[in-house]
Image (tube, helix red, strand yellow):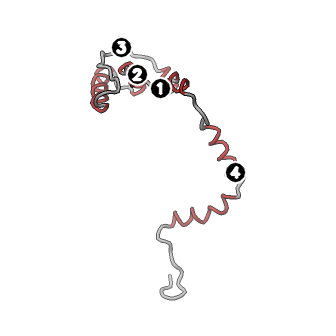
């Protein structure tokens, strides 16, 4: 590499330079527009308050995970929205880890530890 006047400068962040140099090509790319449209279609444009309240708070995978034989849901102090949510979560996890080590089961059980405004 030459030094001094007229020398070719190596970019400090070559990956960033490469990505920036591709932007003009991508702006006119039909594939990029197709990707943008697909991503927009995946994002709901409006969600009513009722839909938010009735939508399950866990994934489909969590919905079908089988509970272990003899599984008993621990008794939780219900969190109403008042108080410390971190302490509630710590208590919830402490009780759940005794009965299971499966995060999908935690997701299914968590709403049982909530009440009042915490369910909104």
CB contact under 8 Å: marks 3 and 2: no
Q: Nearer the viewer, residue 102 or 108?
A: 108
Q: Earlier in the sequence, mark 3 or mark 4?
A: 4
Farthest top residue in view: 70
Q: Earlier in the sequence, mark 4 or mark 2?
A: 4
Q: Earlier in the sequence, mark 1 or mark 3?
A: 1
Which quadrant holds residue 113?
A: top left
CB contact under 8 Å: marks 2 and 1: yes
Q: Earlier in the sequence, mark 2 or mark 1?
A: 1
Q: Nearer the viewer, mark 4 or mark 1?
A: 1
Q: Is residue 117 left or right of residue 98?
A: right
Residue at 65 percent across and 38 percent down: it is: 41
> x and y percent of residue 60 in the render?
52, 25
Identify the mark at residue 111; answer none if there is no mark.
2
> x and y percent of residue 74 in the render?
31, 16
CA distance for labels 1 and 3: 21 Å
Which residue position is annotated with label 3?
Answer: 71
Q: Nearer the viewer, mark 4 or mark 2?
A: 2
Q: Nearer the viewer, residue 18 or 115?
A: 115
Q: Earlier in the sequence, mark 3 or mark 2?
A: 3
């Amino acid at each position: 590499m030459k030094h001094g006047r007229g020398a070719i400068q190596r970019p400090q962040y070559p990956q960033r330079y490469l990505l920036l140099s591709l932007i003009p090509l991508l702006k006119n790319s039909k594939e990029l527009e197709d990707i943008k449209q697909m991503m927009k279609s995946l994002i709901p444009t409006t969600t009513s308050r009722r839909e938010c309240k009735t939508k399950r708070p866990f994934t489909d995978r969590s919905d079908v995970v089988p509970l272990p034989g003899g599984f008993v849901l621990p008794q939780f102090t219900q969190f109403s929205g008042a108080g410390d949510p971190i302490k509630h979560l710590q208590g919830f996890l402490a009780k759940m880890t005794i009965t299971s080590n499966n995060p999908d089961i935690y997701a299914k059980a968590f709403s049982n530890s909530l009440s009042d405004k915490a369910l909104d």
